[in-house]
Amino acid sequence: MENAERFLASFNRIHNHLSFLSKEKEYKKPFYHLLDENEHRNSGVKTYKNDLQIFADLRNVLVHKKLTVNEYLAVPTDKVVERIEMIEAEIKSPPKVYPAFKREVVYFQADDLFTTVLETIKNQRITHFPVYKKGKLLGLLTENGIAYWLANHSELLTTDLRQSTTEEILIEDSKSNNYLFVRKDMSVDVAADLLKNDRKLDALLITENGKVSEHPIGIITPSDL
């Protein structure tokens, strides 16, 4: 009896949470539909969708196929109860962007030379760099921005690139502001949703409180997800 009650309680909490994510009133939309809607919104649903579909079938048996008022046709095992409670915890508390995407964020100053950027790309194989000027973020330097700048200054390819600066590249890149600052406690699911729904975004810069004035402690690009 206890296992059945624990299972149903956990299932109902999951159903309630998925309704909240879908902005639906409690239990107004079928559980299977909520799974489809939230599969790409919540990593726990995506990972355990098959389990949840099986649990939905088991829930229906427990609720609608009782032998008597107090006697169930089937009773979940301890492992089943432990598993649904584990899945519930993952769905309700998805991983955060920090420390999941904690990394040293390589950045440049506006007067740093282009050759320094190229050397960094070569050695560290990263292609997204915040650029600062007098302590303020000037923009995000990306491989696309660099390629666009080179295409517009092909004459420099046969002369000398050593005197060009990061600021010169950013000035001509209309997409250098395609980034967002996010709090370190944002869930990975929400971050993925932001990048998915705004294809123009090149990166999410992670800071303590999501403020422009704070130094990034992590970065997420579309390719990371």
Image (cartoon, rainbow, N blue to C red):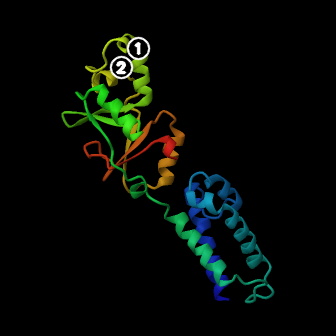
In the displayed structure, 83 sits above or below 134; it is below
Q: Earlier in the sequence, mark 2 or mark 1?
A: 1
Q: Which residue is mark 1?
A: 152
Q: Nearer the viewer, residue 84 or 69?
A: 84
Instruction: State left or right for residue 190 relative to residue 31.
Output: left
Q: Residue 68 appears at what percent x and percent y?
A: 79, 88
Q: Quadrant of residue 134?
A: top left
Tell me, yes or no, whether the two marked residues, 2 and 1, touch with CB atoms within 8 Å: yes
From the top left corner, tell me how far across and down residue 210 is, in percent.
33, 48
Real-space Cα separation, disc 2 to disc 1, in angstroms: 9 Å
Q: Which residue is mark 2?
A: 172
Give the mark count. Answer: 2
Rendered view: 188 above or below 8:
above
Q: Look at discs 2 and 1 and give the one toward the viewer.
A: 1
Residue 194 falls left or right of residue 1: left
**Residue drawn at point x = 47 percent, y = 60 percent:** 95
Frontmost residue, 113 versus 141: 113
Residue in the picture at 22% in, 27% down:
111
Give 18 or 149, whichever is nearer the viewer.
Answer: 149
Which quadrant of the view contains residue 159? top left
Residue 50 location (% of width, % of height): 70, 63
The spot of residue 179 in percent (x, y) is 40, 37
Q: Amino acid type of disc 1? A: Asn
